[in-house]
């Protein structure tokens, strides 16, 4: 079973090189076609989108997948196009291209993304519920496609003529991506035939998937209409009542135009509630422009912190918590970091008991979609030897806040799960939120005697609660990558725990 996106490496975090659409067009054979299809007419499908890669924040012409506009600011694609280990990848890794048939043209719009949401039931191993929603930075002036609803089961009748559209491979024997948008007609296949062992067998989930295509006769050299690599995420549509209705998203297949199996598509009616909800995406802190401390790091001076730069939907409010880094260490060898009681504004007056210690600030940004945090740089408070205070017993600051303790981790082939325990401490208000930020650094590679820059991404990892106080965080495994996972907890009164940091050189 393989995905029908431009590169399998993308699913692991977009750190591979792709064949760009513009470059592929130069090498395109005269007989090139979407397998069994033809070039699409100009402006025939105003809702068709190309998903393109960005590297280190810079646009490229590297086509990854297809997508479809479902409202003025939202698009639908396949989850495997924009996820790693089942988790949504950062929106800043992608652009969308809409309003043009040729990838090399400049007649449409190229727009960045504000957020990426993966269907909560998406399974990266079986590709069940292979749907993702993209929120564009701006509303675009193009007509959206209508989505098949659960009550429109007639659209999926076996034998119904459907149309697949995309910039995917044009020949099953050669890895060539066309410059011009292609289309092909193919029949929908009944669930009974597709789930039979002579079709795609046990791999197909008839609830979240639908099959389409025609098998070539055994021994035939002809190629039947089918989607292929690079078409992933693009629409499978049916005409009904004079308009196009999207019934599927290109998902996977055992081969392109196989004489033994059919192409498999995400059945959009099964994800209708998820697809038609227009989510607000929480703020996402950007690693390169994080919060910065300013002010003299001396006793009695005032330190201040900037908010940093955030993507996602606009921030509605900011909150702050200042921390001290002590001289004691936990069982993992990390210095114990504690929230400073009462230090909850963007400015902080340094007190004498912090002399010689590191301090930093946490900035928490919130909107209707949720909240995320970012950490500032650290400064060491200078010690005035003449005015240094007489040592006093250490004060445990933030004693009422939750307490985060490290646990073990468990790894599979594609991901690792880190476990933590969150105690309520002395608070009685209960833990309301456990957050984790994941920093992944992939070393550069040597190319033509020069080493490329390391690639760094920072993203949110969704915590899953289990038992009474346990939480787990799933981390994708990437070859040679180094990881840092920062976990903190918050109670209902707004008290924040210290930040516990996990470092992994390799998983």
Image (cartoon, grey):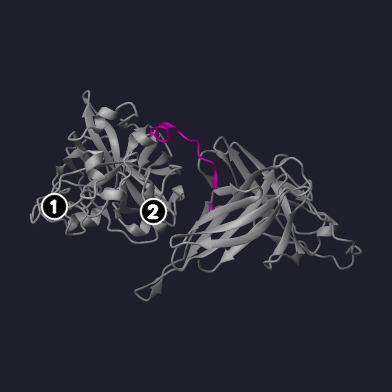
Q: Is residue 391 left or right of residue 290?
A: right
Magenta-highlighted residues = 272-286
Q: Is residue 326 left or right of residue 118?
A: right
Compute the Cα span from label 1 to label 2.
32 Å
The secondary element bearing badge 2 is classed as loop
Q: Nearer the viewer, residue 233 or 308?
A: 233
Q: Are marks 1 and 2 in contact (CB under 8 Å)?
A: no
Q: Nearer the viewer, residue 204 or 301?
A: 204
- Residue 215, x across and y down, in percent: 15, 48
For residue 181, which numbered disc appears in the image? Answer: none
The secondary element bearing badge 1 is classed as loop
- Residue 408, x across and y down, in percent: 60, 62
- Residue 46, x across and y down, in percent: 27, 34
For residue 125, which numbered disc appears in the image? Answer: 2
Residue under label 1, please give it. Answer: 32
Q: Earlier in the sequence, mark 1 or mark 2?
A: 1
Image quarter where the N terminus lies is bottom left
At 41% from the left edge and 49% from the top edge, which residue is drawn?
123
Query: Quick one: which residue is furthest to the bottom in this view?
Result: 449
Q: Is residue 147 left or right of residue 168?
A: right
The image quadrant that residue 320 belongs to is top right
| In magenta stretch: residue 284 | yes
Is residue 292 in view from this perspective?
no
Q: Nearer the viewer, residue 354 or 412?
A: 412
- Residue 497, x across and y down, in percent: 71, 51
Is residue 8 in view from this perspective?
yes
């Amino acid at each position: 079973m393989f995905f029908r996106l431009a590169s399998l490496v993308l699913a692991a975090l977009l750190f591979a090189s792709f064949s760009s659409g513009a470059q592929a067009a130069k090498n395109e054979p005269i007989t090139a076609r979407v397998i069994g299809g033809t070039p699409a007419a100009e402006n025939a499908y105003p809702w068709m989108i190309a998903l393109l890669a960005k590297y280190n924040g810079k646009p490229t012409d590297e086509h990854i997948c297809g997508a479809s506009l479902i409202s003025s600011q939202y698009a639908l694609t396949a989850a495997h196009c924009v996820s790693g280990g089942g988790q949504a990848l950062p929106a800043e890794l992608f652009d969308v291209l809409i309003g043009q048939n040729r990838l090399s043209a400049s007649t449409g719009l190229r727009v960045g993304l504000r957020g990426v949401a993966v269907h909560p039931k998406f399974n990266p191993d079986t590709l069940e519920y292979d749907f993702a929603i993209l929120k564009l930075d701006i509303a675009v002036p193009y007509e959206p496609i209508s989505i098949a609803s659960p009550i429109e089961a007639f659209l999926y009748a076996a034998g119904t003529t459907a149309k697949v559209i995309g910039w995917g491979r044009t020949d099953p024997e050669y890895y060539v991506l066309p410059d011009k948008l292609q289309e092909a007609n193919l029949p929908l296949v009944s669930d009974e035939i597709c789930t039979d062992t002579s079709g795609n067998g046990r791999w197909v989930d008839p609830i979240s998937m639908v099959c389409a295509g025609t098998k070539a006769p055994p021994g035939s050299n002809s190629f039947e209409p089918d989607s292929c690599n690079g078409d992933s995420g693009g629409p499978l549509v049916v005409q009904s009542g004079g308009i196009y209705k999207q019934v599927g998203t290109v998902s996977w297949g055992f081969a392109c135009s196989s004489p033994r199996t059919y192409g498999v598509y995400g059945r959009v009616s099964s994800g209708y509630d998820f697809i038609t909800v227009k989510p607000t995406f929480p703020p996402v802190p950007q690693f390169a422009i994080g919060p910065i401390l300013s002010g003299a790091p001396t006793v009695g001076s005032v330190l201040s912190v900037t908010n940093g730069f955030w993507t996602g939907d606009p921030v509605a409010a900011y909150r702050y918590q200042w921390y001290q880094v002590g001289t004691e260490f936990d069982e993992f060898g990390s210095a114990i970091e504690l929230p400073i009681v009462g230090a909850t504004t963007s400015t902080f007056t340094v007190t004498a008991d912090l002399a010689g210690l590191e301090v930093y600030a946490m900035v928490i940004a919130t909107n209707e979609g949720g909240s995320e945090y970012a950490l500032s740089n650290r400064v060491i408070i200078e010690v005035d030897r003449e005015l240094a205070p007489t040592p006093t017993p250490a004060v445990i600051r933030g004693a009422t806040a939750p307490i985060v303790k490290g646990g073990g981790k468990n790894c599979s082939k594609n991901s690792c799960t880190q476990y933590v325990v969150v105690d309520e401490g002395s608070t009685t208000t209960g833990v309301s939120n456990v957050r984790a930020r994941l920093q992944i650094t992939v070393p550069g590679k040597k190319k033509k005697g020069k080493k490329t820059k390391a690639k760094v991404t920072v993203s949110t990892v969704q915590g899953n609660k289990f038992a009474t106080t346990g939480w787990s965080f799933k981390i994708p495994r990437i070859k040679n990558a180094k990881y840092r996972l920062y976990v903190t907890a918050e109670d209902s009164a707004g008290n924040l725990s210290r930040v516990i940091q996990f470092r992994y050189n390799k998983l």
